[in-house]
Amino acid sequence: PDLVDLVRKVEARGTLNAAGKIRQWLHQIFRYGLAKGVVESNPATDLDVVAAPQKAPRHHPHVPFSELPELLEICDGSKINTLTRCAIHLLVLTAVRPGELRNAPWSEFDLDAATWAIPKERMKARRPHVVPLPTQAVDILRQLQPITGRYPLVFAGQHNPSRPMSENTINKALRLLGYENRQTGHGFRHLLSTELNGRGYNKDWIERQLAHGDADGIRDTYNHASYLEQRRGMMQAWADSIDALSAGSNVVSIKRQA
């Protein structure tokens, strides 16, 4: 019971992966104790039986790529705030997490080099992330400079510029545009992943663009390749394909070049 209580306390924090590791460690410790003759049984053997079930993965809704130009057109024709409109476009063009965008200071951007360097302290995986900026994203950021360039944050709050745009702003705007339960800010990441995987791009490039860790923890430890130049070409092609589809061109012609 004491071991179960210990694991339950860890699970109660929502850290199910950590709880799983603790169960493994306890099992190994008592196995060692049995081998040394210092314990008579292994009370950690059946801890997996009482483990809390893993949470179902969250699915962030997103429209298919074919409907993305219409969404952006509706966004541009709406009366929503300019900063919000630009934030939606930049989420599409960079595939960063909404929080990473909302809290971004101007100091992280090098527009001449078309690069956005996010420090590890602001990343979910606690690993620095370099985002290549397609020309369309650079243009948007240059348009924002006269609006918020005098503040530290790109998306400075409307009522308090020292604080970032509210975390609910983007999803609220998408609901007002008619996309409730069809598109969220985070969902643009899933949209890009689905489309670029379908076009045959290297999965490592896509995963690095999304700042995902490798499911294989050992492989991830040794694979710190940023694929920056490959991702730069991929993201420029992504942005160009959106423009082409918006203009009525055939997106098939902009699929990955061999």
Image: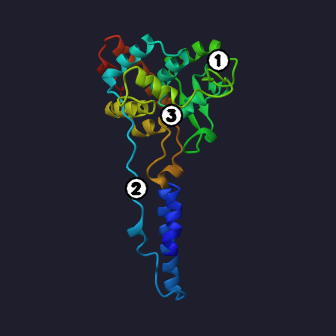
Question: Which of the pair 17/256 is nearer the observer?
Answer: 17
The amino acid on which the numbered mark 3 sits, given as a three-letter code, is Arg
Q: Quadrant of residue 143?
A: top right
Question: Which of the pair 75/231 is nearer the observer?
Answer: 75
Q: Nearer the viewer's eye, disc 2 or disc 3?
A: 2
The amino acid on which the numbered mark 1 sits, given as a three-letter code, is Thr
Q: Which mark is residue 43?
A: none
Estimate how packed mark 1 is, as few (under 14), some (14 to 19) or many (20 or more) residues with alpha carbons within 10 Å: some
Question: Which of the pair 72/123 is nearer the observer?
Answer: 72
Estimate how packed mark 3 is, as few (under 14), some (14 to 19) or many (20 or more) residues with alpha carbons within 10 Å: some
- Counting from the top left corner in percent of width and height, residue 146 is at 64, 12
Q: Residue sitting at 50 percent across and 79 percent down?
A: 30
| Residue where numbered disc 2 is placed | 54
The amino acid on which the numbered mark 2 sits, given as a three-letter code, is Gln
Cα–Cα span, label 2 and label 1: 42 Å
Q: Quadrant of residue 73?
A: top left
Q: Is residue 118 left or right of residue 243?
A: right
Q: Quadrant of the C terminus?
A: top left
Going from N to C along the chain, the mark reached first, 3 or 1, is 3
- Counting from the top left corner in percent of width and height, residue 96 is at 50, 32
Q: Please, what secondary structure does the residue beneath circle 3 have?
A: loop
| Residue where numbered disc 3 is placed | 97
Cα–Cα span, label 3 and label 1: 21 Å
Colour basis: rainbow
- Counting from the top left corner in percent of width and height, residue 236 is at 45, 22
Number of marks in the image? 3
| Residue where numbered disc 1 is placed | 148
Going from N to C along the chain, the mark reached first, 2 or 1, is 2
- Counting from the top left corner in percent of width and height, residue 43 is at 46, 79
